[in-house]
Amino acid sequence: MLTLEKRPSPSRMWTLLTPPLAVVLTMIAGGILFAFLGKNPVESIRTIFWDPVFGEFAFYYRGQLLVKAAPLILIAIGLSLGFRAGIWNIGAEGQYIVGAICGAGIGLAFYPTENPLIFPLMIFAGALGGWAWAMIPATLKVMFGTNEILVSLMLVYVAESMLASVSSSLLRNPEGMGFPGSRNFKDFPAAHNDYLIESAGIHWGVVAAFIAVIFAYVLLSRHILGFQIRVTGQSPRAARFAGVNPSRLILFCLGTSGALAGMAGMFEVTGPAGQISIDFNSGYGFTAIIVAFLGRLHPVGILLAGLLMALTYIGGEAAQSTLGLPAAAIQLLQGMLLFFLLAVDVLTNFRIRFGKTEAA
Amino acid sequence: MDLSSINPLILLASIMVASTPILLAAIGEMVCEKSGVLNLGVEGMMITGAVCGFVVAVETGSPAIGFVAAALGGAVLSLLFGILTQYLLSNQVATGLALTLFGLGLSALIGQGYVGIKAPVTADVNIPLLSDIPVIGRIVFQHDLMVYFSIALIAGVWAFLKFTRAGLVLRAVGESHDAAHALGYQVVLIRLLAIMFGGACAGLGGAYVSLIRVPQWTEGMTAGAGWIALAIVVFASWRPWRVLIGAYLFGGVTVLQLNLQAAGVAIPVEYLSMSPYLITILVLVIMSANRSRAALGAPAALGRVFHASH
C-alpha cells in the first residue's frame, strides 16, 4: 500500500527535478501517441525536440526559437506573479489581443509618418491596452469580489469579437481590395518590429522578454512587493498580519500581467505576424499558462520553459511538414506536459511511503 | 432591419434547444462543486464529449449511442482530473485548466477526419395530445428527447440532494471533508463519483452541440459554453432549479442575438456575438456584489485539497 506523507517544507531537489521528469514522461507518452497515429515514435520525438536545435537545418530553426519563445516568456512572467499570490488571470489571450489592437492602431494612425518616436509610443499603447483589459477583472474583483478566473476568460471571447470587428472595419487596409486585415507593418518602417539580429531571431520583443525576466527576478527576490506576493501565495492569513493589502496586490498582479501580455501582442502583430487579422493570435496566451507552471513560477525557470515550449511549436511544425503529424497532436502534447507536471508535483510536497504507516 | 421576420414562437422554441448544452454541463458541475471540488475543465470535457458523441454517432448511425459515448468520454476525461486532484493532491484550479487545454487538443486530434460531415438526425419526440396544444405545444412539447432528459436531470439532482441520504453525505463532504472523514465517509471516493458525474453531464452537453444544435463537428465548437456553465453555477448559488433558470436566461440571450443578426439589425455582428459573454460578466458581478448571499450558497470546502493524515 502506498501512502503519502506531507513534507514539512517542499523538497528543494524535487522542485528542480519535477519539470525535467514531466518532460521525459511527456516524451514517452507522446511517443506512444505517435505510434498509435502510425508514425515512428523515436523519429517523431527527435524531429520535435532534437532536430530544431541540433539537426541539419538547425541554423534556420534556432532563430525561430527566440521569436516563438519571446511572447510566451513575456506573458508567462506576468502570469506567474499572479499565480504565486493565488490570483488567477487566465485571460492573457484577451489582453494579448487588445494590446495588439491598441499598439497597432496607434501605429497605423500615423501612417505613413516616419518618426523614431512612433514605435516607443506603440509599445506604450500596447502595454496600456493590455493593462486596461486586465483591470476589468481586477477592478471587479476588488470592488465586488467577482471571480477573476471567469471574468478574465469571458473577456477573451469579447476581445476575439473585437479583433474580428476592427480587422474588417476600423483598421482594415484601405488599399487591401476589401479583404479583412490591416496594412502590413513591413511596408511601414517606423512602426515595424524588425529583427535587430536576423540570424538569431532577436527583435524588440525578445529584448523586452529578457528585461522582464530580470525585473521579475529582482522583484521577487529583492523587493518588498515580491515578498508580499510570495507570502500571500503561501498563507493569505499570514500575509494579512504582515500588512499586505490584498486589493493592491490584485491590482498590481493583474495589471502587470495584462501590460506584459499586451506588449507581447503588440510586438507579435508588428513583427512576426505582420498585420492585424482575424486570426493573428495563435493561442500564446493559453500556452503561456503551461509555460508559467513548467517554469515553476520562477523567472529563470520560465525563461527555460518558454524556450522548450517554443521548441515544441517549431518542432511540431517541422514534424507536420516532414512526417505529416497532425497539428492537434502538438496541442495535445502541450496539454499532456502540464498534466504530467501537476501529477509529479506530488513528489515536491509529499513523501511516498511503502507499506502501512503506524497508527498515528 | 426587419424585426417582423423574427417569429416569436420559433424564437421561444429554440431557446430550449440553445439552453440544453449549458444546462447539462452546469448541473453536472453543480453536483461536482457540491462535493467540494472545483473542476474548471468543463470546457475540455464538453468538447471531448462533443467529438466522441459525433464520431460514434456517425460511425454507428445512431445518435443515442453517440450520446452514451459522449457521456463515457466526458467521464473518462474527468477521471484524469479526479486522479490528479484526489490522489496526487494537485491544485484544482491548475488541473482544471490543464484539463481544458488537454481536452481541446484531444478533441481536435480525434475529430480531424470528421470535419464537414453531417450528423445523423435525431428525431423530435412529438408527445401526443400535448404537442397539439396551440402555441405552448409548439414551444415546449416538440423537441428531441435530450431536452426533456436535461429537465428531468435537474429534478433528479434536486431530489437527490434534498431527500436522499446519499445526497446529504455528498453535501456533507462538500461542506467539511474533515468532519465527513471523521464520520467514516469515503471522501475521495464520493468526490471521484461526483467528478465523473460532472464529466458525463458535460460530455452530454457537448454532444448536444455537435449532434443536435449545430449538427456538425468543427474544432473548438463549444466556444466557451463550458465556462458559461461554470458561471451559471455561481449565478444559481448552487441550487438545481436556479441552474435551470440561469441556463434558459443565457440560452435566451444567445438565441435573441442570433435572431437579431439574422434580421440584420444595425448593430454590427461582432457586438451581438460578444453579448452573451458580457451578460455573463454582468450577472457574475451582480451575484458577487451581494457578498453575504453568495457566501451562503457556496460549499465551504470548495476547492480545498483533502489529505487524510490519519
Image (cartoon, helix red, strand yellow):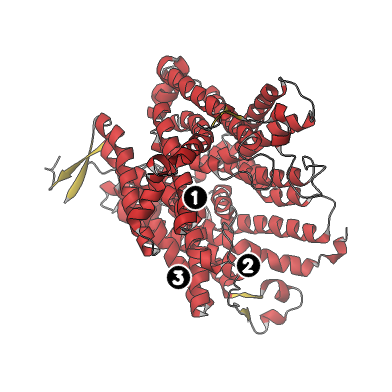
Q: Is residue B184 left or right of residue A156?
A: left
| Chain containing mark 2 | B
Q: Secondary structure at mark 2?
A: helix
Distance from Cα at disc 1 to Cα at disc 3:
32 Å
The residue where tag 2 is placed is B213
| Chain containing mark 3 | B
Tag 2 and tag 1 share a subunit: no
Distance from Cα at disc 2 to Cα at disc 1:
34 Å
Numbered tag placed on residue B69 in the rendering: 3
The residue where tag 1 is placed is A317
Q: Quadrant of residue A291?
A: top left
Picture quarter with the C terminus of chain A = top left
Q: Secondary structure at mark 3?
A: helix
Residue B43 spot, x, y in % from top left: 52, 54
B75 or A313: nearer the viewer: A313
Q: Disc 3 residue type?
A: Ala
Q: Disc 1 residue type?
A: Glu
Could you classify mark 2 by the number of other residues whose Cα lies within 10 Å: few (under 14), some (14-19), or many (20 or more)?
Answer: some
Q: Disc 2 residue type?
A: Arg
How many numbered discs? 3
Q: Residue at x 28, y 53 (%)?
A: B185
Q: Residue at x 30, y 32 (%)?
A: A16
The earlier-in-sequence mark between 2 and 3 is 3
A200 or A282: nearer the viewer: A200
